Image (cartoon, rainbow, N blue to C red):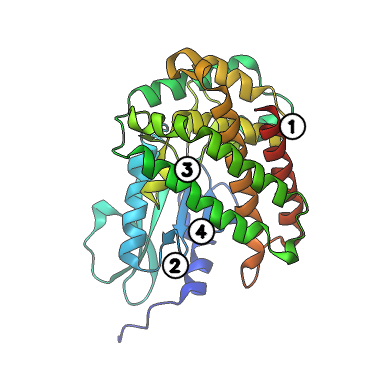
Amino acid sequence: MRPASPPDLEARLRFLRSPAAHEPDAARQAAVQTIETHMSWVFMAGDHVLKMKKPVRYPYLDFSTLAAREFCCREEVRLNSRLAPGVYEGLRALHWDGQALTLLPESALPAPGTVLDWLVRMRRLPRSRMLDALLAAHEATPAQVKALADRLLAFYKGLPAVAITGIEYVSRFEREQIVNREVLMRAEFDLHDAAAALRALDLGLRDNAVRLRERADSGHIVEGHGDLRPEHVCLLDPPVVIDALEFNAAFRQVDPLDEIAYLGMECEAAGAAWIGPQLVGCVGSALEVAQHAPLIAWYTAFRALLRARLVAAHLLEPQPRRAGHWLPLARRYVGLALRALAAS
């Protein structure tokens, strides 16, 4: 029998949405839950999750080739072994044998046929223990936040310094501000307070430039998580943190103060402003936070404006998902930036 042509992307997605692709994980349910994000498709069946990266390319990300997607899948497993040991179980190959699609573990390769794509396989975490779910239910506790802070502190203290000069570190923020301004000042977004927030952040960057350079020159920049948000935190015992940013190493090169400020800002956006100060207080002595309150406020504002830009930029896509969701969220982040800058 002559081999058929490999299935196109839509056919591959149909297969991955079917329970047959996930046996025995889907044996207890009639359907596979699928979530589409900006960069990936996520398939949840039974006790496991599979994630396939979209074949897309942006200035900051390149998933456009099979080799690039495989590399980033491997990076995702490697990086997340640090804060989520045992959760990321390895890769699965989406394999075409000429007649049928199958998902194969790497131990089954090589096999006759072609690998069409790669997926990351994860153990499924309880949704009720995710920090964003606990915040929505007003159930997060100071004891849980303390356990998370201790976990993060141990993580940061175990990381080597990244070789980056203070001048380059400050330049990265300057470049991000250029892009922030390009996006947030677009007339169609009508973000009235964005101009004031951008000006205030510029002034804060000038005032904190010496502190920022000192943080880099004294070895405080590490390869951290890169996207520390409540939806990536699961408050198990001990806590685990998933979805480390795998696609751009520069975005993971962070000051731990920056990541802590980022998580605190996102918790405030979710209605839990008390978490940020507790995180800062828990790690203060070890990360020298007491000396850097203005810097933490500036990091908070920077992250808020960056998030405003990223959510608004969804509307620049040819077919944006949830089009009515993004501008109200961008306005909320702009307001958080102004509030942080006013308190600095």
Mark found first going from the N terminus, 4 or 1: 4
Residue 73, visible in the rendered structure: yes
Judge the density around disc 4: few (<14), some (14-19), many (≥20) Cα neighbours within 10 Å: some
Q: Residue furthest bottom?
A: 2
Mark found first going from the N terminus, 4 or 3: 4
Distance between the Cα atoms at labels 1 and 2?
Answer: 35 Å
Mark found first going from the N terminus, 3 or 1: 3
Residue kind at label 4, given as amino acid type = Met
Q: Is residue 150 left or right of residue 106?
A: right
Q: Is residue 100 above or below residue 89?
A: below
Q: Is residue 149 above or below residue 60?
A: above
Q: In which quadrant is the C terminus drawn?
A: top right
Judge the density around disc 1: few (<14), some (14-19), many (≥20) Cα neighbours within 10 Å: few
Q: Residue 104: give x, y in percent of width and height.
A: 33, 57
Q: Residue 323: give x, y in percent of width and height.
A: 72, 62
- Find disc 3 in the rendering and name its residue: 243
Q: Is residue 192 left or right of residue 173?
A: right
Residue 262, visible in the rendered structure: no
- Find disc 4 in the rendering and name its residue: 39
Seen at 54% across and 31% down, the residue is 234
- Find disc 2 in the rendering and name its residue: 55
